[in-house]
Each structure stands twice: as C-alpha cells, then as structure tokens.
Amino acid sequence: MPTPIETHTRPEDVIVRFVHFVLSPARTRLDIRLYGHTWADAREAFLGDRNKIRRDTYAFHKVWDRIKWRNKPDLASALIVAGRSSFSGRLCWDAKRGKWEYTTGQYTPTEIRRAAYQVALSAETVLKNQDSQP
C-alpha cells in the first residue's frame, strides 16, 4: 500500500484536500439552463438532480463520520488506494501534482458526491482489512 510519504504530501493534506475537493459547492453547482426548454421540464429534472446530490452527500457524510477519526497516515493511504479502484478510478490522487483529480463521466455535479461516497466506502473496507491483519 503506498504511503502519503511516497506522494511527498503530508497525510493531513491528502485528507483535507479530499474533503475540500468533494464538498466544494462549486463542483455541485447546477445550471438550470442545461435542463430543458420549458420551465416545467427543466424544474423537474433540476430538482431530481438536486435531491440526488443531497442523498449522495448524506451517504458520504455517514461513511466519512465512521472513518475520519482514523490515524491520518492510514486514512490517507486508504483513500489513495480506494480512489484507484472505486467508481472506475475517476476520483483519484495525483501524486505528482499533489491534488485530487476527477474524470468526468456525464455531468460532474451529479457524480462527484457519489464518487466520493464510493471512495470513502472502499477506504473503510481497506481500513477494516488492515485492522484484521496480524
């Protein structure tokens, strides 16, 4: 498992940058103009996406509350490892640039929190597996 030291970034920075990256309001800002030609159609689709983002944010926070207290180097390493395999590896740590990257699939605002939830859930699994090893 790579350590944050191998990324030349402090573990605390990896964690803080992850949380800031996925919870940044700018990443989930929806533009109603992209949702349709009539107000009724646009409003329904817009509210559906907004509610999906809220549910994904809530799910992320539930998992994050279970793992955020972990030892910083272990948590940072688990996030890096989980980012490579979760959500098709679209949310991952770029060690050279020292920041989190997201590769867009369809529409970033509706995907980023789901990706963060999947990475956090996988990191939780990595941490549990690490705890169960002698």
Image: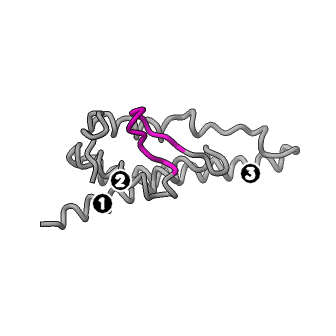
Q: For residue 94: magenta?
A: yes
The answer for how far apart the CA atoms under marks 2 and 3 are is 35 Å
Q: Amino acid at mark 2?
A: Val
Q: Which residue is mark 1?
A: 126
Viewer-side label of 1, 3: 1
Q: Amino acid at mark 1?
A: Val
- For marks 2 and 1, the one nearer the N-term is 2
Q: Which stretch appears magenta? A: 90-102
- For marks 2 and 3, the one nearer the N-term is 3
Colour basis: one colour
Farthest residue to the left: give it: 134
The answer to whether the residues at label 2 and label 1 have Cβ atoms under 8 Å apart is: yes
Q: Residues within 10 Å of mark 3 (few under 14, many from 20)?
A: some
The answer for how far apart the CA atoms under marks 1 and 3 are is 36 Å
Q: Answer above or below: position of 33 versus 88.
A: above
Q: Give the residue drawn at x 39%, y 53%.
A: 120
Query: What number is the disc on residue 45?
Result: 3
Question: 73 or 25: nearer the eye?
Answer: 73
Q: Which residue is mark 2?
A: 81
Viewer-side label of 2, 1: 2
Question: 5 or 64: nearer the eye?
Answer: 5
Q: For residue 105: magenta?
A: no
Q: Quadrant of the C terminus?
A: bottom left
